[in-house]
């Protein structure tokens, strides 16, 4: 299981800069850095002083104290593999080899009905997990359409016979795999798996049709938010959209709710409220 965050300090400041369409030249002056120094920091190297970090936070609109903690590597979530949930089984499947992502197998413990979320790679590993768990898969839900989250979709659809769903805005990202999609996920839609339910909440920005799947005890957030960071964006409108949606729809939940991301360790609403620099 994960022993480090998906995004380091350099990733955080780079995502904030790129998301706001800021050039390196437009940031370095106020931060008191040279272009080479900022590029070095964004690459994950170097140890900036607290004064530099706070100037970067001010220029990038990030939370100063949280960014200082990020630079000092003081935050790691308490339950990186998630926590047990009443009535639900959750298996975080770390899929891939050189490039890793998290797919999820979620089951209702009362009925043995299940759902696969984001079958990114390793169809055989996913199918073994389904067999070992003894689940009957009723749905395949996609948080977004990036290739690393859908790579095993065809095989899982064929093996389980379960319908696959995604927000229609992400259909263009699927290429030929769009033929596997049977319906569109819409805002507020509730999916029932056995005696458990998940509500779809749109969190566009990382992709046009990004969604989070909200249960009373957990949320499957795809690449919208990571422990101590946020999904990547390249336009200011997408950056603002994603931050706003997360603040309004996800980080307003009970602090104990577990967040299961598409990469890196699991976290909780409370931990991200306390530690994520993207949220003041």
Image: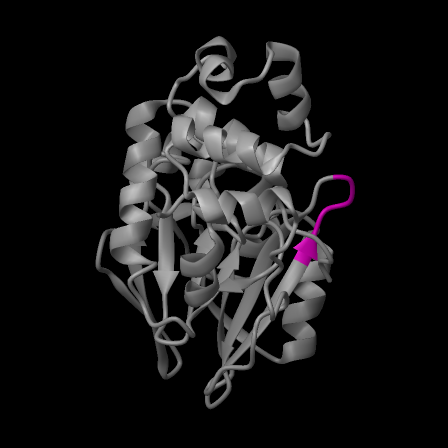
Tell me the magenta residue range.
94-98
Q: Position of residue 16 (x, y in %)?
A: 45, 31
Residue at 47% from the left image edge and 90% from the top image edge: 110
Residue at 56% from the left image edge and 77% from the top image edge: 83
**Residue 110 colored magenta?**
no
Farthest residue, direction left: 188
Q: Position of residue 213 (x, y in %)?
A: 37, 60
Lateral position of residue 19 relative to residue 146, left or right: left
Farthest residue, direction front: 51
- Judged by its main secondary structure, the magenta piece is loop
Q: Position of residue 209 (x, y in %)?
A: 33, 40
Q: Position of residue 267 (x, y in %)?
A: 53, 63
Residue nearer the viewer, 53 or 85: 53
Say above or below: 241 vs 125. above
Residue at 33% from the left image edge and 42% from the top image edge: 243
Residue at 51% from the left image edge and 86% from the top image edge: 109
Say above or below: 200 vs 10. below
């Amino acid at each position: 299981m994960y022993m480090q965050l998906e995004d380091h300090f350099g990733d955080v400041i780079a995502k904030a800069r790129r998301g706001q369409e800021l050039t390196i030249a437009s940031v370095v002056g106020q931060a008191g850095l040279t272009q080479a120094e900022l590029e070095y920091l964004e690459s994950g190297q170097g140890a900036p002083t607290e004064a530099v970090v706070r100037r970067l936070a001010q220029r990038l609109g990030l939370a100063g104290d949280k960014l200082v903690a990020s630079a000092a590597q003081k935050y790691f979530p308490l339950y990186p593999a998630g926590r047990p949930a009443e009535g639900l089984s959750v298996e975080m499947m770390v899929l891939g080899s050189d490039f890793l992502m998290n797919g999820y197998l979620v089951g209702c413990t009362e009925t043995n009905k299940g759902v696969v979320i984001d079958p990114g790679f390793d169809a055989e590993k996913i199918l073994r997990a389904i067999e070992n768990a003894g689940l009957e898969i009723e749905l395949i839900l996609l948080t977004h359409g990036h290739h690393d989250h859908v790579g095993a979709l065809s095989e899982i659809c064929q093996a389980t016979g379960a319908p696959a769903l995604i927000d229609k805005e992400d259909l263009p990202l699927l290429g030929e795999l769009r033929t596997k999609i049977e319906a569109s996920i819409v805002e507020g839609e509730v999916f029932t798996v056995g005696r458990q339910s998940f509500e779809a909440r749109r969190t566009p920005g990382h992709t046009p049709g990004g969604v989070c799947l909200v249960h009373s005890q957990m949320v499957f957030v795809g690449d919208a938010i990571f422990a101590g960071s946020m999904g990547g964006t390249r336009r200011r409108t997408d950056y603002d959209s994603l931050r706003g949606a997360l603040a309004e729809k996800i980080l307003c939940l009970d602090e104990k709710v577990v967040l299961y991301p598409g990469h890196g360790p699991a976290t909780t609403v409370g931990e991200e409220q306390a530690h994520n620099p993207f949220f003041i």
